Image (spheres, rainbow, N blue to C red):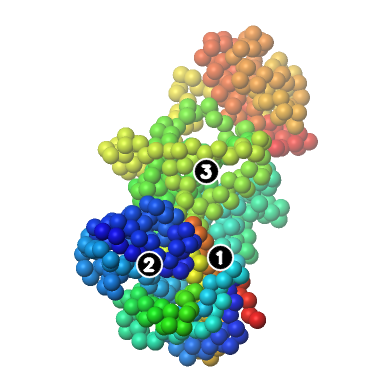
Amino acid sequence: MITISKQQLDEIREHGVRDYPYECCGLLLGRYTAEGKVVTETYPISNAREESAKRNRFLITPEELMRGERYAASRDLEVVGFYHSHPDSPAVPSNYDLEHAWPTYSYIIVSTRADQATDLFSWEQQEDRSRFNQEEIQCP
Amino acid sequence: MPVTITIPAPLRQFAGGQSQIVVEAKTAGEALDSLTTTHSALRRHLFNDQNTLRNFVNVYLNDEDIRHASGPDTPVKDGDTLMIVPSIAGGSVIESEVGQDLPELSNEEIMRYSRHLIMPEVGMQGQRRMKAASVLMIGTGGLGAPVGMYLAAAGIGRIGIVDFDVVEESNLQRQIIHGTKDLGRRKIESARDRLRDINPHIEIETHESRLTSHNAMQLFRNYDVIVDGTDNFPTRYLVNDACVLSGKPNVYGSIFRFEGQASVFWAEKGACYRCLYPEPPPPGLVPSCAEGGVLGVLPGIVGAIQANETIKIILGAEGLMINRLLLFDAWTMKFREFKLRKDPKCPVCGENPTVTKLIDYEEFCGMAAHQAPPPDTKLEEISATELNARRLRGDKLQIIDVREPHEFEIAQIPGTKLIPLGHVVGRMNEIDPNAETIVHCKGGVRSAKAIAALKRAGFQGRLINLKGGITAWSEDVDPRVPKY
């Protein structure tokens, strides 16, 4: 389960619509608790990769992630997951995603159109790496 | 050298909850090996099946990517820190890359296939792959019915169907693609209408012909996957060989009485049908469903398995039934599985194949001899009308019925003696060699075999086969005798 506020979900949606028709992405910062992950901040990653997207399959490079980790550590937070948008496609991960993910992290995907964000789901990889399971989003 | 490895938060649960672990190592690779030996659950998240670091997993030695140094051989020294950092992939970037040639889905299609789309294993890309795919079904009978209906419903973009038969009453107990209103219609037309009704978004191509050595290669060339729904050995070997020669996967299913088999024969990846059965059984040893019967549900189950495997092939799924033969018994409700192995000596897919083009499969299966007996053993035949006329004239005739007792219960020609085919030689002394003997079965095939067997066993009397069996009797003489 992931707990995230409506305001943060709106930030993710807005980011997705702003970057349409490109994909947007970012980090979810917060804490791992006994009740699951709690997001306290979203951390948008700059969208400077459109030119390289065709060569580079990665949305968030390890350097960017390390920068995000350092920022999180400075605020006593951790990276609990990631978000990205799927312009004009459903908010579900692909087989490719499965190969390139770790369990425990939340992977929030938002489906975007030119003028609005539609579905938004959170996914978590099963421990045996065989699939993604949809994760409950708790929105206090 | 003691080296500290920092474990990223999501992987700590696989490392006993620790965020830092100290190991002894000389290189970065050794350090990771040592870590994943102690904490084996970590391994699959860091390494792939080929034992190399997953390509989204990055290892930093004191803030430098080891890929920019010497990779796993990068030396480490006392007090160094290794950091494991993922890079995050975006699936839909890839979809737009590899999916460029795949057809788009309309909004109606997205709605229709939503239960597929929300599963990551299928997703948008998988559904588009199905739309781009083509499948050729051989036969629209018991197996072809569920195969066609499920593949059409799943959204396979182009389905080809091969059949030359017409819909008969005795088909409807299992061939659920056809209905009572279709009796007498050509099967390909009836099947096409049903599939169109299930899914108007797909293309259906009908081929009204018998599959032969002359047309198979040309037909197969235009499809991605071939599904074998045939009920006889010559066509089964033909489908197998044509699949091997054209490099197509052959999704196999067969049924008899209560037992079914299924497998995926794909020579590039595993065994073919001939690796399993190099030679066909002697003609007549294995009866067809028309002679032996089949539980109507059985082809539903086996055909659904074939449809399932076909979809998995198209999706590029793992766990295909390659090198696996599934045996299903509907009566005991048991599934069993056998491992198959590619035979290096296989005449068609082996290392030195002797079959390099399609052959005469009727002859290969001994059917040709069957259809045209050699002149010296010429089979004497009589039609149902003629037999009736002779009986009415009062000719002295004995009629032997070589069907099974439960068939005898369904319908009989009056005044006949029942000796099932399997007993006919053993009970030869019950047949009077001085009388003219008419032998009959359901359609004329088993009675011809009985006559051949009796002749071989030295029976001296005159034996005459009833052409068309009791079915012809019902059609031409006495419609009160039920056809089955």
Residue B146 vs residue B275: left or right? right
Q: Nearer the viewer, residue A81 or B327?
A: A81
Q: What residue type is labelled 2?
A: Thr
Q: How far apart are marks 1 and 2 (CA)?
A: 27 Å
Q: What residue type is labelled 1?
A: Asn
Q: Mark 3 lies on which chain?
A: B
Total marks shown come to 3
- Give the residue number, with chain letter if any, for mark 2: B6
Q: Where is residue B205 in the image (x, y as percent from the top left)?
A: 50, 61
Callout 3–callout 1 Cβ contact below 8 Å: no
Q: In the image, which is nearer the foreground, mark 3 or mark 1?
A: 1
Q: Please tell me the numbered disc located at residue B262.
A: 3
Asked whether the residues under marks 3 and 2 belong to the same chain, the reply is yes
Mark 3 neighbour density, 10 Å: few (under 14) some (14–19) many (20 or more): many
**Can you say which quadrant of the picture contains the C terminus of chain B?**
top right
Give the crowd class for mark 2: few <14, some 14-19, many >=20 residues within 10 Å: some
